[in-house]
Image: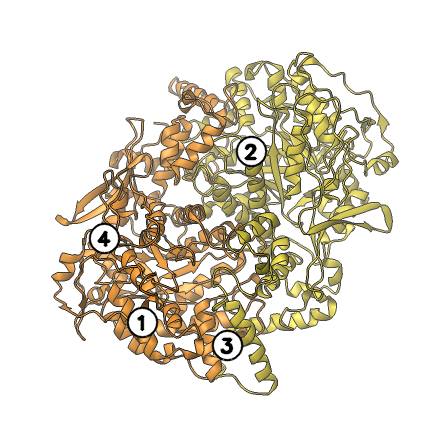
Chain colours: A orange, B yellow
Amino acid sequence: MNAPVLPKDVKGSPETVTTGPVTGSHKVYAAVGGRDDIRVPYREITLTDPNEAPVRVYDPSGPYTETDARIDLSAGLPQIRAPWIAARGYATAEPRAVKPEDNGFASADKLVAPCPAERTLRKAAPGQMVTQYEFARAGIITEEMIYVAHRENLCREQMLDRAEAALADGENFGAAVPPFITPEFVRDEIARGRAIIPANINHTEVEPMAIGRNFLVKINANIGNSAVTSSAAEEVEKLVWSIRWGADTVMDLSTGRNIHNIRSWIIRNSPVPIGTVPIYQALEKVGGDPLKLDWEVFKDTLIEQAEQGVDYFTIHAGVRLAHVPLTARRVTGIVSRGGSIMARWCLAGHRESFLYERFDEICDIMRAYDVSFSLGDGLRPGSIADANDAAQFAELETLGELTKIAWDKGCQVMIEGPGHVPMHKIKVNMEKQLRECGEAPFYTLGPLTTDIAPGYDHITSGIGAAMIGWFGTAMLCYVTPKEHLGLPDRDDVKTGVITYKIAAHAADLAKGHPAAQLRDDALSRARFDFRWEDQFNLSLDPDTARTYHDETLPKDAHKVAHFCSMCGPKFCSMKITQDLRAEVLAMEEAGQVVGQAPAMSEAEAEAGMREKSREFLAEGGKLYVDAAE
Amino acid sequence: MNAPVLPKDVKGSPETVTTGPVTGSHKVYAAVGGRDDIRVPYREITLTDPNEAPVRVYDPSGPYTETDARIDLSAGLPQIRAPWIAARGYATAEPRAVKPEDNGFASADKLVAPCPAERTLRKAAPGQMVTQYEFARAGIITEEMIYVAHRENLCREQMLDRAEAALADGENFGAAVPPFITPEFVRDEIARGRAIIPANINHTEVEPMAIGRNFLVKINANIGNSAVTSSAAEEVEKLVWSIRWGADTVMDLSTGRNIHNIRSWIIRNSPVPIGTVPIYQALEKVGGDPLKLDWEVFKDTLIEQAEQGVDYFTIHAGVRLAHVPLTARRVTGIVSRGGSIMARWCLAGHRESFLYERFDEICDIMRAYDVSFSLGDGLRPGSIADANDAAQFAELETLGELTKIAWDKGCQVMIEGPGHVPMHKIKVNMEKQLRECGEAPFYTLGPLTTDIAPGYDHITSGIGAAMIGWFGTAMLCYVTPKEHLGLPDRDDVKTGVITYKIAAHAADLAKGHPAAQLRDDALSRARFDFRWEDQFNLSLDPDTARTYHDETLPKDAHKVAHFCSMCGPKFCSMKITQDLRAEVLAMEEAGQVVGQAPAMSEAEAEAGMREKSREFLAEGGKLYVDAAE
């Protein structure tokens, strides 16, 4: 690893950010679309078996995982989008002057300096095309669309003959995942409102990514400052650590002192889209009293954060006065912070939400920078008892109404979802969201499938996340083991991210995503061949896999041992089977019939077809040759 | 806690076993059926709110969690079933003489003494009714059936008006979970072969439990000796630790030295059914060479273990010669140890499995002690690529054939299932098993829903376990984080058990099990009321929940704080909502209409009906009164 250059002028502990490749892999960039300014990143895992092609996996970790990463937090990341944005000809603008309340009135001695990286503020004029949605509707393919098309394909270039569709035997509940993703497909999905590319024109460092039902399922990690900490580098490290393990977007939920300046450090150094909940900062500006909130302070906060480059805003405009009474008899009432703040505001003055009434103006502000909407589910259920109730669904219907307004205004939109939902009530959430919100991407928190395991809610929610991801949710917001109990530490964040990568991948497999099973198969072959290093390196967490193995079989010799610690050398089932396989294949070659073949079962028939398509594909690409061949 | 009396004469480290109640709860016994010799155990969690009834939860942990537990491993647990069995009048028998190979030829200095607890060996004569299946078919309700009927009901006594059926709004895919479980219902389920009570007549210490689709979903934990360890107390502690956290049955997969004698310690001190895989010990007796296996050594091993009191045997009689070639082209071949051993044996001599050919005799031996069958899935898939293939389903069809033979012989039967299966292929496994095996209980390992996360396979499998449990699987075999990598330690076992308790409970909720949501609702009310202690104690793992909370908010004051660490005191959504609720309810009482009520949505209608049934139930039992009332 190569120690990053750290900000000189940042107060707080001189933290370092984590750099260097994830164990067993290295970063590769593929120049695509015949343009050397569009370089798509992958993490490539090289295997010890020369017959095994390296496995390329989706990689949101940015330059931090390059082999010789040179990171300078003060300069920020390379502005890969700068030339694309510049070519679109937006006027430069004067940044809004920073006010003391933007940083929570931090006193001079406590003030964290803003990130010194120089950036040009840009803003679209009224009527000037700026959002990915507007370009898509106009039939224009942007660089961002080309980038995500290639990024989503992973190894699918080897499968252009489309035959792999035969292998994609999943159930996708009406999704339209294509065998191969083209820039035109991306444009069309965005134009239909079925996908978004959250990318503020002032976040030129972002590596474009797509959120939509017909793309890989994504995950989000939440970070935030805690009372005690806060050097800028410390906050940036939370981001770097989250994306290292696979977070596709990060929401900064910080409150209190220095949030404006620390946000500048986070955005300038983030290769993934950053989301925020502006109402949090607006509330701080009025001293934490919901009743003091008004449109002016909220509007000012939207502009402040949009100029900084935030890529998506959670806006709780679906919490209307009429919905509040629907929550009164709930077991856990309103559990969303934004939702409870707005409900408080509405009920106090017995007035309609200003977010709802000013929604047009909110759209105009967000459109000018291409900030995407994440329409917040302020009334999501906070317990199994409240799942799918009147309040939740009334808000969802309002979010559907707002989605269409935002589209008319040219904005990109996704919809936030629950929460706490038992397994049998998950599917209807997805179906209703698709129906009410015109297939706009769904972005859910879990859902948690039971309330009885605080301390393990990454698991109670991982179950629901995998299922709703399969049903069609485009992005899953992670839950850590500390949910409901405390603030996640470094290990909790990693556990949360890995758990959600599992849920997202299990969903991709079940949907029949053409390339998803490549990694499973490569790992399974490594397992069967006792290629321990390959098995570790193909894991979502190579370090933990290796550590667990070494606890039982520490000796290096065992890394190549042809047995595993469960059975030991004496009778390892895998070893026995390897011998069996050789024998059976030999006997078959000799034309011997082994036993009496059972009647052809439907399963066998299916397997036969599968085998056929395998053989066919074998020509297409080495990766699909069965290990047995 | 009260230190248990430890065996004096056991070699190895003087370990102690864990005793005393799980934090925040105490053991209660309810004498049922008007008989003081049938005392059903529950774990009762008392809450700090006087308006909250204590919550009773299912408790497989045995006498070890009594407040003043007095444990004497040398004497074994109380023989609660002894009088029931004695009354059935089986002849006493002379135990088979222990042979050196039974203990892996352990030399005198290494030999662990057997458990000295005195027990009378009993065996049914041919034609003499002995199995729960035989009694059930004859229309006889046994003490074991009465015991499990009450055990399964938990708090359902308060719901005899049956109205709670309205609350059980789950989807159970054709299961027949009744509002209230009677001994006659248990008898009928066993007579239909849809449930079993694994209880060897020589395991008089077992607290009867039921495994069946129409009962609570159960979980199994695997334990086994490791090369390094082995005092008897150390092995018993693995059992005690597993059941403390909720394991309903335990499989002893030990191999090597002292297994016969250590097994005697485990069984004499186990309140839960113990399962084994006899082929493992049989293989040891012939020096680990599958080709040296024969019927005689296997038969002798069955009798040896049946006499000791093992409650169920995994028998891989479904691995037939003709199935072996179906595995040759698999990515991961045969991953079951028993399966690979039998495949090896069949192929070597090109002969049919002796387990299959001698199945009648196996039934006769097991029937005489009421040892239940766990028909092993020796050909379960070991990877996503091999899921639902010809080999797996061919074996399942054979297991269906064997199930009917075992029933004709009077034996209790459950069926083992996969393995590694992507989400979209899970349901067909359940459907095919129900069809092929006449609704005999399904007992699955996971399934793992992806192969790419070694180190986290408790999670990849917990997702599949929750789903297949919902679809109808009766018992879930746990998977620990060390799966595929190494041997689980104490923490891994606890993590595996808690993860599977989550999966099983999520499944019970989704199936609409009438009493399942009581605990979720109690915990949710505690959360909303900021009753932190109650929230911790209602958790599956109170200690971890408390620890996580204290890491962020260590001060005791915070245990009663009316805010949580996520939002902090400034604007806690829960706090805001509590105020809102009060206001709304007050306004409504004053006849004010809050906002414009939205059109009655289907969700609202549904909620209305739900509310009605709640009100109705409120009369039935305090537990069902909504927290808001």
Q: Secondary structure at mark 3?
A: helix
The disc numbered 4 marks a residue on which chain?
Answer: A
Three-letter residue code for mark 1:
Thr
Q: Is residue B371 left or right of residue B454?
A: right
Is residue A361 at least partly visible in the picture? yes
* Mark drawn on residue B189: none
Q: Nearer the viewer, residue B49 or A574?
A: B49
Marks 1 and 4: CB-CB under 8 Å? no
- Report the residue marked by disc 2: B489
Determine the image quadrant of residue B97. top right
- Report the residue marked by disc 3: A324
Per the model, the C-alpha gap separating discs 2 and 3 is 49 Å
Q: Is residue B524 left or right of residue A254?
A: right
Q: Position of residue B482 (x, y in %)?
A: 50, 35
**Badge nearest the viewer, 1 or 4:** 4
Could you tell me which residue is drawn at 48 percent across and 57 percent down? A447
Crowd tier of the residue under label 1, counting other residues whose Cα lies within 10 Å: few below 14, some 14–19, many 20 or above: many
Per the model, the C-alpha gap separating discs 1 and 4 is 24 Å
Marks 2 and 4: CB-CB under 8 Å? no
The disc numbered 1 marks a residue on which chain?
Answer: A
Q: Nearer the viewer, residue A189 or B323?
A: A189
Three-letter residue code for mark 2:
Asp
Q: Position of residue A237 (x, y in %)?
A: 34, 49
The disc numbered 3 marks a residue on which chain?
Answer: A
Marks 2 and 3: CB-CB under 8 Å? no
**Badge nearest the viewer, 2 or 4:** 4
Three-letter residue code for mark 4:
Ser
Per the model, the C-alpha gap separating discs 2 and 1 is 51 Å
Could you tell me which residue is drawn at 76 percent across and 30 percent down? B369
- Report the residue marked by disc 1: A301
- Report the residue marked by disc 4: A74
Same subunit, labels 1 and 4: the answer reads yes
